[in-house]
Amino acid sequence: MRTTTINETAAILGCDPKTLRRWIKAAGMTATRGESDAREWHLTQAQVDRLARLHARGGGASTVGRLEELEREIRELKAHIASIKRQNAREGHLEVQETALPDPVVSPYHFDPPRQPDSAPTRGYALTYGTDAPAVFSHRADAGRWLARHGVNELTPKTWPGWRAVELTPRAVLALALSLMDTSNHRVTWRLRRCDDDACVCRELL
Ligand SMILES: [Zn+2]
């Protein structure tokens, strides 16, 4: 049977030999005399383990046993992770994860260059003319298409602060665009220009 001396046991349990003797006495244990040297008192592994448990110390075989237990748990977890990865790869989850990233949050004051060139062909727009009142666009999208004739991609105004609230008259729409055109900001790529309509308000504002 493997045994340890009082001094060895004290070192394993991290306590003073005097303390250890007190613990042995308190636990009602009997140390045995060594076979080679009768003056040495020895403790069995079971006794060391019991003392370690009683005094909440790591020591002796209990630590080795706990270590082996942890190593086994780690091996099991690694195997489990590997099986999850294999399963995900089979089901294509990894690709989904890469493409399903959330859209970046865009602040209303953030101008991104339009994705379409400003020279993209534009559809028509509807302007309703009143008798005394200024002409009004039927829809905001029409105002965007009208602006496209003045050098702005029709989708760009949707990113403008104030676009959703602007009055839908050519003058108000063009004035808003003019107030946001910042030639010193390299991120604002659009530039306003006059259209080919001699009666257009752009002749007055631009
Ligand atoms: Zn114009």
Image (cartoon, rainbow, N blue to C red):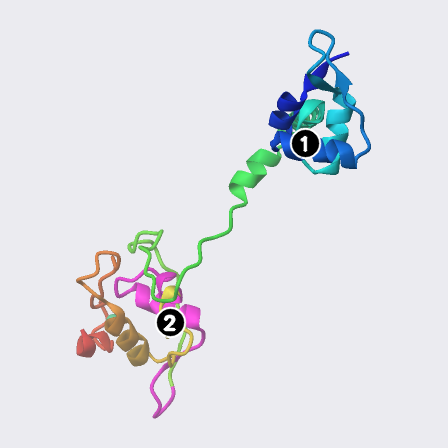
Say if the magenta span includes residue 141. Answer: yes
Which type of secondary structure does the marked residue at label 1 adopt? helix
Seen from the viewer's position, the closer of residues 184 and 122 is 184
Crowding around mark 2 (Cα neighbors within 10 Å: few <14, some 14 to 19, many 20+) is many
Tell me how far mark 1 sits from mark 2, CA to CA: 90 Å
Q: In front here: 22 or 75?
A: 22
Q: Is residue 23 placed above or below 4 in the rendered structure?
A: below
Residue topped by disc 1: 20
Residue type indicated by callout 1 = Leu
Residue 114, percent from left and from top: 33, 55
Residue of label 2: 143
Q: Residue at x 69, y 15 (%)?
A: 39
Q: Residue 65 in the image: x percent, y percent?
A: 71, 24
Residue 9 on the magenta span: no
The residue at the far bottom in this view is: 132
Q: Kindly state the secondary structure of the residue where label 2 is placed.
A: helix
| Quadrant of the frame with the C terminus | bottom left
Which part of the image, by quadrant, shows the N terminus? Answer: top right
Taking the image as shown, residue 114 lies to the left or right of residue 34, namely left
Q: In the picture, residue 194 is in which quadrant?
A: bottom left
State the extent of the magenta-drawn residues as a range.
130-158
Question: Mark 2 near ligand 1 (CB under 8 Å)?
Answer: no
